[in-house]
Image (spheres, grey):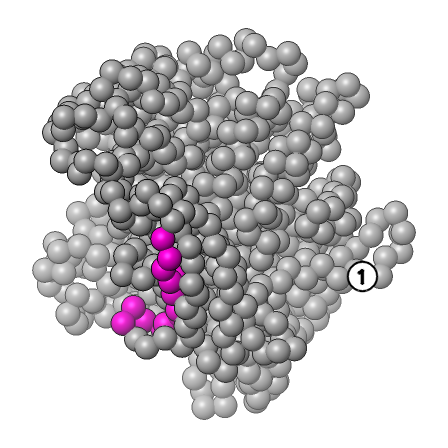
Amino acid sequence: DARLIPDPYIRFGTDELKYVGEQDYTYSLEEKVDIPKGSTVTLVVEGVIVFSKIYVNGVQVGETDNQFITYKFDVTNQIKDRSFNIKIVFESIVKAGEKLHKELLYPLPYILTKGAPVGRNLMRIKASQYGWDWGPSFPDMGIWKNIHLSILPPDEITLTEILPQITPHDEEKLWYVDVHSQAVSNHNQPIQTQLELSITSSPTSKPISIITVPITLIPGTNEFDNVIQVHFDHVQRWYPIGYGQPTLYQLHIRIQNTSSITRTIAFRKVQIVQDALPTKNPKRPSKTFYFKINDIPIYAKGANFIPTESFEKKNTDQRLKQVLENVILANHNMIRVWGGGIYQSDFFYDYCDANGIMVWQEFMFACAIYPSDSKFLSSVKQEVISQTKRLMHHASIVIWGGNNENEVSMSGHGWYSQFLTPDTKSRYYVDYKKLYFDTIRSTLLSIDSTRTYWHSSPSNGAIIDEKDYFVAVWDDPSRWEMGDLHYYDDYKHDCTDVRRFPRGRFISEYGVQSFPSRFTFLKSSELLPEDFSYDSKLLSSRQHAPGVTQGIVEQLQLHFQCNETFLVKNFDHFVYLSQIQQSMCIKAQSEFYRSLKKSESRTMGSLYWQLNDIWAAPSWASVDYMNRWKPLHYESKRFYGALHVMSYYDLVRNYVVHVNSDLLVDLQELNIEIVAWKYDNKSVVPFHVVKRVFDMPALDDVVLFDSNDISNDFLNGAQLNECALRLVVSNKNGEVLCENFFFPSALKNVELLVPDLKLSAVKKSDQFLIQLVSNVVTPFVFVDFDGEIDGLFDDNSFLMVPGVVKHLTFTCRDVSCAKLSEQELIKHLKVNHIRLTY
């Protein structure tokens, strides 16, 4: 913001600005303050990165070593005569990391992005600021949150915290709201007063429940524990998206005639069900793993969230709102806050609370072995206390996670298997236990015992999981019979082949890369014409996952009629194909996992990697850095729909058709049509149609077809490369409830005709109603807009067939777009499809 350095995202800023983190810095401020005589004055430091010494009026009042702690220093004796001079001296984060690294007694391995400094796991910082396989290395330092003085005048009282834990008591039909509160008195003697706790449905409504208790406040800090009981019938429960309303209430606490605090709360029952299942091998126990909210089993649908910005000062509420709106619009119901970033702002969790988005919240540890010395663990303990107290009232948080991929790596499947010897492995297990069980878990549960703590992702969980007694499974976390899984293929095999997918209980990470659009690169990174090739120097520098660009190219040649030379020379076609391929791969996995709800694996959740981007670069994101939806995000809106029809070749290569429902009601007399359209035919009459009437039970999955001869059963004897299938489910009134498409043979084997696509638009306020017609079968039609406007389609990346009009709504997201006429808008649009790419 001070413009002392150029925009780091422009071109090769990651290399040109390395020196920034290598220097020490001093921040200072001097001003006059009015403080009543006899006041207690506290300096509140909400967030600094990371090693600093803090001086007030020339006296050191404290030091910091953790980005995630809110520090409070008593500066009453330092501030006199209205003079307030604060100085914060920061040690170079790069030099600090190097020093800590040299002092290690044995290696503590971690994922290191090429060119990044060492030591990011030895400091309590946002791990990804040292780079990741999707993001840049900018070792940031300085002040990243507010710093202020908290003044408590003489003979006054202030409430400093309110920590609610809400639990249902089914036998009594009561909610118990256990409230721990803290108040500070600046009186010089004990005083008698009253503490009032109440629950309301809005800030100004009458209390649903209220209690008043007499208290004695002594000088200094006072703590209180109280319980409010609320009958089940007097409040509405909080539900995730798709299952009911996310009803919120306000918890008020007030000391008579003085101080008050309000927290937004909700009433909901959260369980992670891990019931034992039959197993053929007693040495390999088997358990379910799924979320149950208010006694309803929930199929979790969503994606993983990474930091939106390298520099958190740019991580505005508006930016977060855009990301979370994308979650809702695409029918996601869960978001995993990944452990290599930051604990998000209050706005983030408030928005999730209000909109029914379930949050899998990890503590900020990822892809590393961390120290276990007393100083480091003490800092972590304060971090857990600080963040748990801040976040625990949020109903949207349904699980606490200990770390990302640190357990699985110790089993030999991860990124530091080369460091594992019998000696180091035993040391790492001890370090792991000290950090994640003895420190994080025990500290967390002493404050919030209402949620499950899942010590790693992926993990098999625990054999015994009681508050004061915890025994981990300590088995291979990549096995499917318990807990959650992560899965990434190698780009050398067909990414749509379900035979390669795991049949796990809950798939919490899986992903495939693609490139963002030309317009995203132009807007955020100032690319030049010579940069627009996937193997250019600049774009190669932004690909942080070794070998993946070549893997994308090789995978494209498994699916489409393209060659490497063509892709190098035609950047826009390469981007389009990479994005379509990404959507195909993730769609195949997501639909397969969803279809396993009633199978032996009882899969009950899928969170793909990843939702958002941190800059313009090749990545796994479904929405790019400029908030442009890639085809994957449009596809996720369909495959995460409450009612969804899907089809694929199963493990024995039969063609199966499932319909899956997350609805709470049964549906009767639904119709499915599976319509075959020939690629070489311009007729508006389908080549072949198969129909069936069926009933759809609530929260269920039904298999409607299981064919070992797709050609005769669905293509009227045609060859696999001659037809595309369109699947449509409608009710008895003919209303289309969901639809999908399937290509019996890879499109590289298909001779597509050149379509005559016609597009028209009608303006309606800040929206445009668009009609699209094709005269031939046209796979993966993706309507894109240029960089001069911003907007969002209600659907995209679809199959078009002759005679079927596609209706779209385009909603403008900027003023210049809203001012356009229909013809002006059309000039900004481009219709992409597969036949353009060869």
Left or right, 131 with respect to 274, comes to left
Question: Where in the figure is residue 67, as x and y percent of width and height?
Answer: 41, 31
Quarter occupied by residue 425: top right
Q: Does the magenta stretch include residue 195?
A: yes
The secondary structure that dominates the magenta segment is strand
User: Which residue shows up at 21% across the image and 67% down it?
Assistant: 768
On screen, residue 154 above or below 269: above
Q: How many labels does the image show?
A: 1
User: Which residue shows up at 44% across the image and 65% down it?
Assistant: 213
User: Which residue shows up at 57% across the image and 45% down it?
Assistant: 444
The C terminus sits in image quarter: top left
Quarter occupied by residue 434: top right
Question: Where in the figure is residue 819, as x and y percent of width and height?
Answer: 9, 60
Q: Which segment did they paint magenta?
A: 191-204
Left or right, 253 with respect to 761, comes to right
Whether residue 240 is visible to the viewer of this picture, yes or no, is yes
- Three-letter amino acid code at disc 1? Leu
Whether residue 16 is visible to the viewer of this picture, yes or no, is no
Q: Residue furthest front?
A: 189
The N terminus sits in image quarter: top left
Question: Where in the figure is residue 762, as x and y percent of width and height?
Answer: 18, 71
Kindly identify which residue carries mark 1. 277
Under circle 1, the secondary element is: strand
Left or right, 601 with respect to 784, comes to right
Q: Which of 111 and 518 is in front in this view?
A: 111
User: Which residue shows up at 77% across the image and 18% down it?
Assistant: 423
Left or right, 653 with respect to 577, comes to right
